[in-house]
Amino acid sequence: MSQSLAIQLAERLRSEPLDLVRIAGEIAERSGYGLYLVGGAVRDLLLGQANLDLDLVVEGDAVELARALQRQAGGEVLTHPRFGTAKLRRGDLLIDLATARAESYEHPGALPTVRPSTIVDDLARRDFTINAMAIHLDASNFGRLVDPFGGQEDLSRKRVRVLHDNSFIDDATRMLRAVRYEQRFDFRLDPATERLLRRDVSMLHTVSGDRTRHEVELILREPCPEKALARAEGLGLLAQIHPSLRGNGWVAEKFRTARATAHPPALGLYLSILVYHFTDQEVEDLATALKLPGATARVIRDSVRLRQSLHALETPELSPSTAYRFLEDYSPTSILACAIASDSPLVQTRLKLYLDRWRHVKPSLDGQALQRMGIPPGPRIGRMLRALLEARLDQRVRTRSEEANLVRLWMSQEK
Ligand code: CTP
């Protein structure tokens, strides 16, 4: 690396509000430890993009360094001495510190076995060259780049490249990560890396549902997840997760609509669009494959169930209260998903009316007001409130006094 780049990096680091990092560097220097910024923050610094997610690697004791840093600079520290890691939070800034380690995999999909080591070993266990660079933070080398695998060149050639031929076998989640970075930065997979990915695509089965879900969620948190999904479909990755998953043009269009509607769209909304054309069984299979949490599984189940009965909302003369009764048991996210995904303008309008207006409607009178009007406590109050709500929805009453008149009418009829 040229001297000028080291200076540039050091300057950029200094210009950020990163005094904590500099103090950590001074402590490391005094302790005789090597200290490095690693991973995404280095990549983004070289790309000129902001990233305050700071991962630090220590050639030495990360837990001890984190405690010393806290004593000197404040903040809260959380340590995991067994793993040699610590987190320090001060204000908005979150710093992860880890002892440099080397790792080996017992079998594909297994979590790696780790042992303390050097920064180069620590970089060697990472996913892609662009994520396998480090910047010295120890005071005397501050700002110097460590780039043993050609990450800087791959950044300038816009390449996502693995470090070795077994990378996807060791950790198949890297295949999903590869398309996420490729599409986020408008890079390309290095041709050899793409061949390895196509060779190893079936290894995605070696990964636990939790880890696959985590990577799918990371894709869905990207600014334009549909790009990575389309690419993942093209590479056969989506089919490994579930054979009916698509990242095609329809999905892309509906994802864009979702973003125009909700900022940012909830994961459940994106997932509901992805499973919109699924059968109930396919939804269950996907929920199991991705070990979806109960609440998310309910949302996508609801979306498919609602999609299957949306024709009920196509009836021309449909009162708001009837539509309300039909929709009230579905989660709002599943209703929004159907409003986005349905091709029928009438259905879309009714779903949106429900979400924007009908579900917020409340009668002016409450249970106490009804009791004051002479209705004894009991289930009749609940039935009347419900009838008032429906009268409000259908605009048969518009004011509190019209509601009271209606209640009096019902009372007189019930006598
Ligand atoms: N990493 C890896 N293999 C994984 C996950 C992570 O090698 N399966 C390494 C990479 O070096 C990565 C770093 O751990 O840069 C931090 O991971 P993460 O926080 O997930 O990614 P970032 O690089 O910070 O990227 P992003 O911008 O997506 O958060």
Image (cartoon, rainbow, N blue to C red):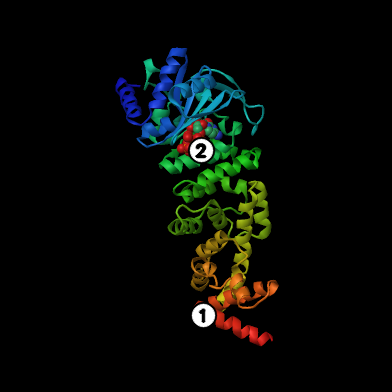
User: Which residue bears the numbered disc 1?
Assistant: 401
Which of the image's four quarters has the C terminus? Answer: bottom right
Q: Are marks 2 and 1 in contact (CB under 8 Å)?
A: no
Local secondary structure at mark 2: helix
Q: What residue is shown at x 50% (from left), y 67% (from top)?
A: 352
Q: What residue is shown at x 41% (from left), y 25% (from top)?
A: 21
- Foreground pick, 400 / 368: 368
Residue 395 seen from this side: no
Of discs 2 and 1, which sits in the foreground?
1
What amino acid does circle 2 point to? Glu
Q: Quadrant of residue 334?
A: bottom right
Report the side of 162 relative to 4 (left or right).
Answer: right
Q: Measuring from the top left, give residue 221's x and y in whole percent.
A: 49, 46
Q: Quadrant of residue 368?
A: bottom right
Q: What residue is shown at x 59% (from left), y 44% (from top)?
A: 213
Residue 234 seen from this side: yes
Q: Measuring from the top left, give residue 234's x and y in whole percent.
A: 52, 48
What amino acid does circle 1 point to? Ser
- Foreground pick, 192 / 28: 28
Which of the image's four quarters has the N terminus? Answer: top left
- Foreground pick, 384 / 60: 384
Report the side of 336 relative to 138 (left or right).
Answer: right
Q: Quadrant of residue 83?
A: top right
User: Which residue bears the numbered disc 2?
Assistant: 194
Query: On screen, 351 above or below 175?
Result: below
Find out if the beta carbon at label 2 lies less than 8 Å from the nearest ligand 1 atom.
Answer: no
